[in-house]
Image (tube, rainbow, N blue to C red):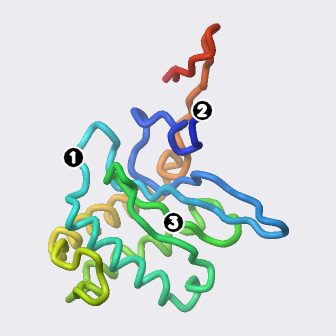
């Protein structure tokens, strides 16, 4: 079975940032999946699960209410590894083009006084939220993006060469 694209990236070299994970063409239209990476995979602690859940609610609500972007948003959700999120938008933009949107979204979390949709009626696990930790992670990531705005590595997956052995096994040369 062939590895899906997100598993084909060398996770030992990813740093926090905004990356294009994939671009799909659907007829005349394209859809882009972005890797919004808050943590270095396998090298630093992952995001607390309750904070991740709160960030999901807060940022999804922000994105779907942003007057300039709400019609472009298809999906916002957490990565299973708890190191970041996937954002799926209509069209195809470079990661730098959505940096301002991500900064506004994460800064909005810092100002939040409650987690939207955190009730038994609206959420499948409404008790698993942590607004204070979500604010901590949001500030950490927004500060990082601002401090590294000129660093190309924050917007481009690390270069890696995918090699295949004589017997057909994939491995990565970092």
Q: Is residue 165 above or below residue 173?
A: above
Which residue lies under the disc numbered 1?
45
Give the image location of residue 47, x and y in percent: 25, 56
First in residue order: circle 3 vs circle 1 = 1
Q: Residues within 10 Å of mark 1 (few under 14, many from 20)?
A: few
First in residue order: circle 3 vs circle 2 = 2
Quarter of the view holding residue 97: bottom right
Give the residue drawn at x 34%, y 78%: 57
Outermost top residue: 166
Residue 87 is tagged as 3
User: Disc 3 or disc 2, which is closer to the eye?
Assistant: 2
Closest to the observer: 15 or 82? Answer: 82
Which residue lies under the disc numbered 2?
1
Closest to the observer: 27 or 100? Answer: 27
Q: CA distance from mark 3 to mark 1?
A: 22 Å
Give the residue drawn at x 19%, y 74%: 129
Locate residue 19 relative to residue 48 in the image: left or right.
right
For label 2, the SS is loop
User: Disc 2 or disc 1, which is closer to the eye?
Assistant: 2
Give the image location of residue 126, x and y in percent: 21, 79
Outermost right residue: 28
Quarter of the view holding residue 41: top left
Residue 14 is tagged as none
Q: Is residue 124 above or below residue 78?
A: below
Give the image location of residue 108, x and y in percent: 34, 82
First in residue order: circle 2 vs circle 1 = 2
Closest to the observer: 122 or 105? Answer: 122
Give the image location of residue 96, x and y in percent: 57, 62
For label 3, the SS is strand
């Amino acid at each position: 079975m062939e590895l899906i694209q997100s598993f084909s990236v060398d996770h030992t070299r990813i740093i926090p940032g905004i990356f294009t994970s994939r671009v799909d063409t659907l007829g005349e239209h394209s859809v882009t999946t972005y890797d919004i990476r808050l943590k270095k995979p396998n090298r630093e602690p992952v995001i607390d699960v309750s904070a991740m859940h709160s960030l999901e609610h807060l940022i999804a609500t922000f994105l779907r209410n942003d007057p300039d972007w709400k019609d472009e948003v298809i999906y916002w959700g957490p990565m299973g590894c708890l190191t970041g999120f996937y954002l799926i938008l209509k069209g195809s933009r470079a990661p730098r083009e959505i940096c301002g949107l991500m900064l506004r979204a994460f800064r909005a979390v810092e100002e939040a006084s409650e987690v939207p949709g955190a009730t038994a009626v609206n959420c499948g696990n409404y008790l698993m939220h942590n607004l204070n930790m979500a604010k901590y992670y949001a500030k950490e990531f927004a500060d990082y993006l601002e401090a590294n705005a000129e660093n190309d590595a924050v917007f481009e997956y690390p270069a890696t060469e995918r090699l295949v052995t004589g017997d057909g096994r994939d491995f990565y040369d970092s």
